[in-house]
């Protein structure tokens, strides 16, 4: 009876967290990632009144107050939990050029440290039918491919250059969320996963209005492991 008490929980936990088909999923491994991104901050103008006329109807305008463009490189841990779920914590270093449309326009550069402990959810079973890309010597052909949905929280620390900080701005600590779509191509011994994602982050530093600054980011990344 005592032996059964320990065997049953171990059997249940193994089936929940273990791999059921080792042929389609690699072992726990480390990988590298390279990304390029662009982000924008949209600022809704406050109620404006035309003081040169008797018309006091509020006017609204939406402008892009800040843009960032850059690239990143980092590494991640690839941890399959079961057939359709992978835990993928990722740490990246980013470099970007920034511009704030606050007359006059202010330019700056920044270095970021970004941590995103994400999950990749398989959208359908892996396609095991190989597609030949190099047919003469058969040195490189696809063994499987699988589309997936990526969901992840984001923690980002942005450090600006000294010239930007001397103008009264601050380094930023941002929190947010990312959602993306990718396809995992598996070659013999190598996995190649291009990915596109949308990130929404918020920070309390360098606010243009009373609300927190919200950044909308589109990222293209390549993950190799």
Image (cartoon, rainbow, N blue to C red):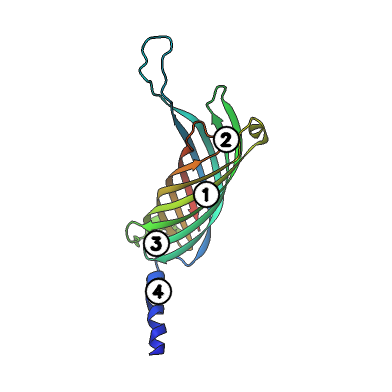
Q: Alpha-carbon neighbours of circle 2 within 10 Å: few (<14), some, or many (≥20)?
A: some
As measured in the structure, the alpha-carbon distance from the residue carrying label 3 to the one carrying label 2 is 35 Å
Q: In this view, does 30 lie to the left or right of 126?
A: right
Q: Which of marks 1 and 4 is nearer the N terminus?
A: 4
Q: Residue at label 3?
A: 85
Viewer-nearest residue: 178 or 24: 178
As measured in the structure, the alpha-carbon distance from the residue carrying label 1 to the one carrying label 4 is 30 Å
The label on residue 13 is: 4
| Element at label 3 | strand
Query: Answer yes or no: do the residues labelled 3 and 4 have beta carbons within 8 Å?
Result: no
Q: Which of marks 3 and 2 is nearer the N terminus?
A: 3
Q: Residue at label 2?
A: 97
Name the front one of labels 2 and 1. 1
Q: Alpha-carbon neighbours of circle 4 within 10 Å: few (<14), some, or many (≥20)?
A: few
Viewer-nearest residue: 6 or 121: 6
Name the front one of labels 1 and 3. 1
| Element at label 4 | helix
Q: Residue at label 1?
A: 155
Q: Vertically, is 122 above or below 165?
A: below
Image quadrant holding the N terminus, namely bottom left
Q: Vertically, is 110 above or below 136?
A: above
Query: Answer yes or no: do the residues labelled 4 and 2 have beta carbons within 8 Å?
Result: no
Q: Which of marks 3 and 4 is nearer the N terminus?
A: 4
Task: Write the residue at 46% across / 51% down.
Answer: 153
Query: Answer yes or no: do the residues labelled 3 and 2 have beta carbons within 8 Å?
Result: no
Q: Alpha-carbon neighbours of circle 1 within 10 Å: few (<14), some, or many (≥20)?
A: some
Q: Earlier in the sequence, mark 4 or mark 2?
A: 4
Query: Does any portion of residue 195 appear in the rendered image?
Result: yes
């Amino acid at each position: 009876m005592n032996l059964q008490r320990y065997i049953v929980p171990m059997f249940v936990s193994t089936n929940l967290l273990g791999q059921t088909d080792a042929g389609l999923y690699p072992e726990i491994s480390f990988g590298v990632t390279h990304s390029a991104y662009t982000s924008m901050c949209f600022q809704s103008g406050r109620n404006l009144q035309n003081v040169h006329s008797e018309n006091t109807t509020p006017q609204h305008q939406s402008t892009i107050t800040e843009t960032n463009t850059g690239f990143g490189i980092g590494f991640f841990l690839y941890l399959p939990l079961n057939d359709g779920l992978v835990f993928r914590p990722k740490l990246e270093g980013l470099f970007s050029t920034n511009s704030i449309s606050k007359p006059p326009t202010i330019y700056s550069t920044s270095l970021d440290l970004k941590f995103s402990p994400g999950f990749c959810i398989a959208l359908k079973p892996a396609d095991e039918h190989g597609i030949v890309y190099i047919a003469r010597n058969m040195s490189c052909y696809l063994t499987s491919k699988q589309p997936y949905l990526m969901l992840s929280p984001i923690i980002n620390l942005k450090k600006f250059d000294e010239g930007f900080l001397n103008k009264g701005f601050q380094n930023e600590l941002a929190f947010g969320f990312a959602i993306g779509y990718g396809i995992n191509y598996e070659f013999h011994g190598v996995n190649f996963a291009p990915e596109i994602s949308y990130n929404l982050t918020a920070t309390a530093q360098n606010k243009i209005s009373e609300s927190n600054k919200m950044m909308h980011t589109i990222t293209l990344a390549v993950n190799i492991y």
